[in-house]
Amino acid sequence: MREESRAWADEAVRRIEADFNRSADTHLIRVELPRFPGITLYLKDESVHPTGSLKHRLARSLILYGLCNNRIGPDTLLVDATSGSTAVSEAYFARLIGLRFVAVIPRSTSPAKIDAIRFHGGEVHMVDTAAQMYAEAARLADDAGGLFLDQFTYAERATDWRGNNNIAQSIFQQMSREDHPVPSWIVCGAGTGGTSATLGRFIRYGRHATRLCVADPEGSVFHLHHADRSVTEPSRGVRCMIEGIGRPRVEPSFLPDVIDRMIAVPDAASIGAMRAIAARIGRPVGGSTGTNVHACLEIAQEMAASGETGSIVTILCDSGLRYAGTYYDDAWLDGQGIDWRADEVRVAALLS
């Protein structure tokens, strides 16, 4: 590496680390469950990151990984295939270190996410389906001599799962003075699989009794692959409308062996739970949070039925403000054929 390039990379790492130092840890919201005595739900609020979602952590790790592997220089074009939130965060960090970033996204991505990518200086390149993202992102990067960040491959290895302020370490530190400091269950979704890999590894590294559940949309392949490793495609005719989680293929960063359980969640149940938990905590959350909450309440009911007490921790992935024109628009949902109303009533009753 030439001295000037090394100096640039050193400064890029410093800027990213300085940005981290300016950020406080995300909040852990306690939600009482009166219907389930001795069981408490906690939401790890990742929406308060500077770019508004859990993917802020991943984007920082991916770009640091590229820098420290000497794959990013002062003129490198950064490209990634993404459903939206990761691109928002990658655009933020790319601009922080003075680089151009292009997000390859499906046309179905919410307009608010597209606006956020552009707000942070990113460019948008659309494809018709999520399955087309990977090859197109690789082509754009190759043509420009740039770097395909490839979150779906590198998410599980770019994050330090032993600690270093990752989300797992943060959860266990914040839970340390609660009634049940070691969670009975941690529930998360899977988009790349990086978060579930980090949580599952950290739980085993810390020798915690906690079990890990991944809440997965019915139209995703992940829960099918977890049950049967030979399955590599989702069920035909079952769509997945929840942005950010669920995939049409088994991603390289998805590690089923560190997951104790998966719960498949219909889209209508995700939207109903999203609406109900938003009303319970007094602010909008995204669809993937609804998926998580649905799974948490299924687990809470099972724990109560067997006489167990304990804590359940899940992730509030992003704000519902990004979905004002979709998941919070009754007419849009009706147009998609999603009837969430009964699920919202049911979940609201469980949370009341």
Image: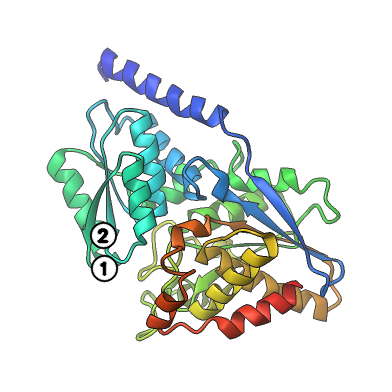
Q: Which mark is residue 133?
A: 2
Q: Quadrant of the C terminus?
A: bottom right
**What crowding class fits label 1: few (fewer than 14 Cα within 10 Å), some (14-19), or many (20 or more)?**
few
* Kind of residue at disc 2: Met
Q: Residue at x 54, y 77 (%)?
A: 265
Q: How is the image coloured?
A: rainbow
To which residue does mark 1 refer? 129
Q: Quadrant of the N terminus?
A: top left
**What crowding class fits label 2: few (fewer than 14 Cα within 10 Å), some (14-19), or many (20 or more)?**
many
Q: Residue at x 56, y 78 (%)?
A: 269
Q: Nearer the viewer, residue 257 or 132?
A: 132
Expressed as whole percent of the image width and height from the top left, the position of residue 179 reads 86, 54
Expressed as whole percent of the image width and height from the top left, the position of residue 89 reads 41, 44
* Kind of residue at disc 1: Thr
Eyeballing the image, is 100 above or below 149? above
Q: Nearer the viewer, residue 334 or 297?
A: 334
